[in-house]
Amino acid sequence: MSVLVTGGAGYIGSHMVLTLLEQGEDVVVVDNLSTGNEWAVPGQARFYKADIADADALDAIFATHAIDAIIHFAGLIIVSESVEAPLDYYSENTCKSRVLIQRALDAKVESFIFSSSAAVYGAPGLEPVTESAPFAPESPYGTSKLMTEWMLRDVAAVNPGFRYAALRYFNVAGADPKMRAGQSSRQSTHLIKIAAEAATGKRDGLQIFGDDFDTPDGTCVRDYIHVTDLANAHYCALAYLRAGGPSVAANCGYGSGYSVRQVVDAVKAVSGVDFRVTQAPRRAGDAAMIVADSTFAREAFGWMPELDDLETIIRHALEWERRLGNRTGGQPDG
Ligand code: UFG
């Protein structure tokens, strides 16, 4: 059997492909390369350049490969962009997922893992958030992910052969410890990526958005998860679904929070570079604190994080950033 990875040429998807190949899985990647890079797909995986809304292309893939599971990453991920262009997000993240889910049902795919987000919770307050917290997305991005979760819930309810895991990611960062993959986009808005760019001289410093939040040092607190641990969480979820586990939604974070200032200080310490940091007003829509209660993923899937350490995450992000050099979307040095 084969596993189909949508968005497998992107940041998280490319790490997933590496994890699956290491586990001896046969991997098929579909990616439209709107943000991904073909070089990020290892040669052992079968690559198709296609959009997930291209039903004919999907049907051809299902006719060629015996796919029992789909891991669906393809989509747009920039929260602020989703506020400016909501229909793009509903189109790319929700409508296109609907096409993929329909094709998956027609092809009798049994297991579906969906790349969801902590953004479905909005601003959950100061305690670690469990999966039963109320949904309160504060951006079209979060809503587009939640709508897809609900499609999966409703489809699974009437198709007993179809089960899904919606994995709600917290703040994904870092790079493959063996440096085969990493975050390559130059458009990223994510803190650790931006700090790594500042530390490697690709940006003229970094701004801290807001220092008057109700947190210990006034800056926002987030739960940073290493991308390789996140890929492993998916693999554990896949094993769980293949073993007959019922459909679930699960948080993917470590349960420990770091403030923006702590992250910036850690990047300076690990890199040894004292890049320029300026204080800026709050960024629209930022919640004071978002930290996962990830008990469920650990218990239900037997997920055991191995890279649960901010310094390790930063070290890998920095190493990848150095290898990327100044090329935009270019292949890093080996
Ligand atoms: N930040 C800065 N300066 C920067 C970039 C970020 O101060 O240059 C701050 C932000 O204001 C925020 C924190 O760093 O307080 C983290 O910001 P990120 O952009 O790295 O991540 P977010 O927490 O905003 O978003 C992440 C994911 C989203 C997901 C969301 C769910 O990237 O996909 O968590 O909570 F929707």
Image (tube, rainbow, N blue to C red):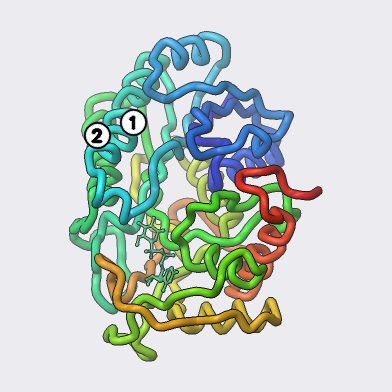
Whether label 1 touches label 2, CB < 8 Å: yes
Q: Amino acid at mark 1?
A: Ser
Q: Is residue 201 above or below residue 57?
A: below
Q: Mark 2 Cα within 10 Å, few/some/many (few <14, many 20+)?
A: some
> Percent from the top left, x then y, of residue 23?
68, 40
Q: Quarter-wise, where is residue 65 in the image?
A: top right
Left or right: 126 in relation to 197: left
* Mark 2 residue element: helix
Label disc, if present, on residue 97 of the rendered structure: 1
> Percent from the top left, x then y, of residue 330?
67, 43
* Mark 1 residue element: helix
Q: Residue at x 71, y 41 (%)?
A: 22
Per the image, the residue denoted by label 2 is 151
Q: Quarter-wise, where is residue 52 in the image?
A: top left
> Percent from the top left, x then y, of residue 131?
30, 58
> Percent from the top left, x then y, of residue 37?
60, 37
Q: Amino acid at mark 2?
A: Met
Q: Quarter-wise, where is residue 229 in the image?
A: bottom right
